[in-house]
């Protein structure tokens, strides 16, 4: 099989993938796959051997690897004219000049040809001599007279110096510690200096020390992807060399939405004026019109309840979408969300892990939210410590969650009516134009969506009430359900994780008969999401674990000793002895001091303390 000369831009088929030659440096050929952006590095000898064995096949020639005729046709008109002038000079030389000739005869010939063809810049005799030699060496091919760009020449160094340069580049500079070029060059200079000192004692010739500029040129000639990968890691190299085409956008406004969650760059306070942190924005963006289809702002971490709340709002306003594109976040990649989407007939698709550009539209929208809304609010965090500077975000915070929701709703209307250059209109007008030509979507009411997106528990019914996670619900029909339950049988409790204010209880034998039950703590449970309640419970558990019970135990111990003293006092009264009565009266006087232990502590090594003030001993 023929072996081709590898050139930058050429494409080869390898392992059922098409690779393009990105760079050829220092005998290493860097290839990048067209589909997955995989990188492979093959030396020139291995490349030729793989091509000879048929493992590597030419898929498409490089743009610069054209035939001579194609190169001639692609030349500008002035360069084509210069080519014809060269050919005329060479042909005249071969017809008229035979054997040896003088410089005067050559100049005379050049002047005659230049006058004949109208060339105002005739060549010198030596230049014409070189053209003639090149023409004859190529078997009189006229394309040999085309002007070739000279290849860059690198500084020629001894092989031992080249090996040392290559060694310090790969073992020092291309490491994760990321030393500077100057440091690597100093090590190289030190190595050569130590080697020359040994050579001086042996009488051997000294090695030449390469300059810092030569060392830099060797590093810069390497493949940049490989340099970044060795110094910063694979992900950094992929980010530095990433490239992609335009994302496909379906013109159907109901085809899909992009979903993602993000912390907003603003600090909020509660009703008591205490700073509670940054809220979470969960958003559905329509890529066709750039409209914000549905959103939810709440505190806590991203969760399924926030995602379903934003989804319900999007469906109620615009209709059901066919697909939701998202990352592998826990708010959408969970059983309850997937079951809800299956009931609604919505498919889900996920972008590749670690590839934020796959959902670039919503990432750009979040940037617009930051720069156009959050960074102008009191208490903004500005996105980074450097951008925030000395601004006291916590001290300036004055917005509650309800204030932020109201302000964001107004800003969304402003965003929908703002001109966008890529759309050449506003998102609102673009969406209206797309919806005019689209089929009507499937629609649901908010109540229907909340009923369809229910989950369930299996709970016991106790005196007309059900309880779960310190929450209690009661209803008129729950007692009837509880009486019908068999031993160890539990009722089905349907609930909406976005709102724990109301649940529905059904007997397992009659699952279609739902009995409503409302929360006993309506102020807390109404509008409460399951994730927020679990977060509150976790905070209480943490507070309980960190609570110091020592003070209560000390007071309990003192109370026990006082009761034992009272018992001893009552026992001594029955004996009617005056001496013991006086002793007991002194010890049982009401004071702030702790009494002496009524039990005999001599047998307890731990309690065998020095007699004195008990309060001082305990302290």
Image (cartoon, rainbow, N blue to C red):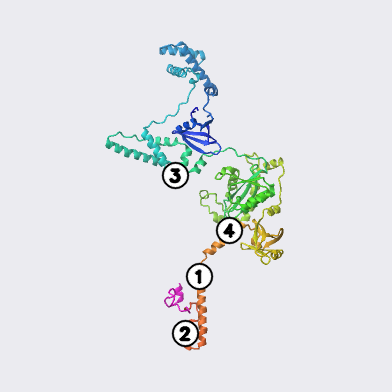
Q: Is residue 336 magenta?
A: no
Q: Is residue 600 magenta?
A: yes
Q: Which mark is residue 96?
A: none
Mark 3 or mark 1, earlier in chain: 3
Would residue 267 appear left or right of 42 to someone viewing this image? right
Vertical order, 157 against 525 (above or below):
above
Mark 2 or mark 3, earlier in chain: 3
Residue at label 4? 535
Residue at label 1? 551
Residue at label 2? 583
Vertical order, 522 against 137 (above or below):
below
Mark 4 or mark 3, earlier in chain: 3
Mark 2 or mark 1, earlier in chain: 1
Vertical order, 618 against 256 (above or below):
below
Vertical order, 70 against 56 (above or below):
above
Mark 4 or mark 2, earlier in chain: 4
Q: Which residues are magenta?
A: 597-619
Res. 407 in view: no
> Label 4 to label 3, Cα distance in Å?
40 Å
Q: Position of residue 536 (x, y in %)?
A: 58, 60
Q: Position of residue 267 (x, y in %)?
A: 57, 54
């Amino acid at each position: 099989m023929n072996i081709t000369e590898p050139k930058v831009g050429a494409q080869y088929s390898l392992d059922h993938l098409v690779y393009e030659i990105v760079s050829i440096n220092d005998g290493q050929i860097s290839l990048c796959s067209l589909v997955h952006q995989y990188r492979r590095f093959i030396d020139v000898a291995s490349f030729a051997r793989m091509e000879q064995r048929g493992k590597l096949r030419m898929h498409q020639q490089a743009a610069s690897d054209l035939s001579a005729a194609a190169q001639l046709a692609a030349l500008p008109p002035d360069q084509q004219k210069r080519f014809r002038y060269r050919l005329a000079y060479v042909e005249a030389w071969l017809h008229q000049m035979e054997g040896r000739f003088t410089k005067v005869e050559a100049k005379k010939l050049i002047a005659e040809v230049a006058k004949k063809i109208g060339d105002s810049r005739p060549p010198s005799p030596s230049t014409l001599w070189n053209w003639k030699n090149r023409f004859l060496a190529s078997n009189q091919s006229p394309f040999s007279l085309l002007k070739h760009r000279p290849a860059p020449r690198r500084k020629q160094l001894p092989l031992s110096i080249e090996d040392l340069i290559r060694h310090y580049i790969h073992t020092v500079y291309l490491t994760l510690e990321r030393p500077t070029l100057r440091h690597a060059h100093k090590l190289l200079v030190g190595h050569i200096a130590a080697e020359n000192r040994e050579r001086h004692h042996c009488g051997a010739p000294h090695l030449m020390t390469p300059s810092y500029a030569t060392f830099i040129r060797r590093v810069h000639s390497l493949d940049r992807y490989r340099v970044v990968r060795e110094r910063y890691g694979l992900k950094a190299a992929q980010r530095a060399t990433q490239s992609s085409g335009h994302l496909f956008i379906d013109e159907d406004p109901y085809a899909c939405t992009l979903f993602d969650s993000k912390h907003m760059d603003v600090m909020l306070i509660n009703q008591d004026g205490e700073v509670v942190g940054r809220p979470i924005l969960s958003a559905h963006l329509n890529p066709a019109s750039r409209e914000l289809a549905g959103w939810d702002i709440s505190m806590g971490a991203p969760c399924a309840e926030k995602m379903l709340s934003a989804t319900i709002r999007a469906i109620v306003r615009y209709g059901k979408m066919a697909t939701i594109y998202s990352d592998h976040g826990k708010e959408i990649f969970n059983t309850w969300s997937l079951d809800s989407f299956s009931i609604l007939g919505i498919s889900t698709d996920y972008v590749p892990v670690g590839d934020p550009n796959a959902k670039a539209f919503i990432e750009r929208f979040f940037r617009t939210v930051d720069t156009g809304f959050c960074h102008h609010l009191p208490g903004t965090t500005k996105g980074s410590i450097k951008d925030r500077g000395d601004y006291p975000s916590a001290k300036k915070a004055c917005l509650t969650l309800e204030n932020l929701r109201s302000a964001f709703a107004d800003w969304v209307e402003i965003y929908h009516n703002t001109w966008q250059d890529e759309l050449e209109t506003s998102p609102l007008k673009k969406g209206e134009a797309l919806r005019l030509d689209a089929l009507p979507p499937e629609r649901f009411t908010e109540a229907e969506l909340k009923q369809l997106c229910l989950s369930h528990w299996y709970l016991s019914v106790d005196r007309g009430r059900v309880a779960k996670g310190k929450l209690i619900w009661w209803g008129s029909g729950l007692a009837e359900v509880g009486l019908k339950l068999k031993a160890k049988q539990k009722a089905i409790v349907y609930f909406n994780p976005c709102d724990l204010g109301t649940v529905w209880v059904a007997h397992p034998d009659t699952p279609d008969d739902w009995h409503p039950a409302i929360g006993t703590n309506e102020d807390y449970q109404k509008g409460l999401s399951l994730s927020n309640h679990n977060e509150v419970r976790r905070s209480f558990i943490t507070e309980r674990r960190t609570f110091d019970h020592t003070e209560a135990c000390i007071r309990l111990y003192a109370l026990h000793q006082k009761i034992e003293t009272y018992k001893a006092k009552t026992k001594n009264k029955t004996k009617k002895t005056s001496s013991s009565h006086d002793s007991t009266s002194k010890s049982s006087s009401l004071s702030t001091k702790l009494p002496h232990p009524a039990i005999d502590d001599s047998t307890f090594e731990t309690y065998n303390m020095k007699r004195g003030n008990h309060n001082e001993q305990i302290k």
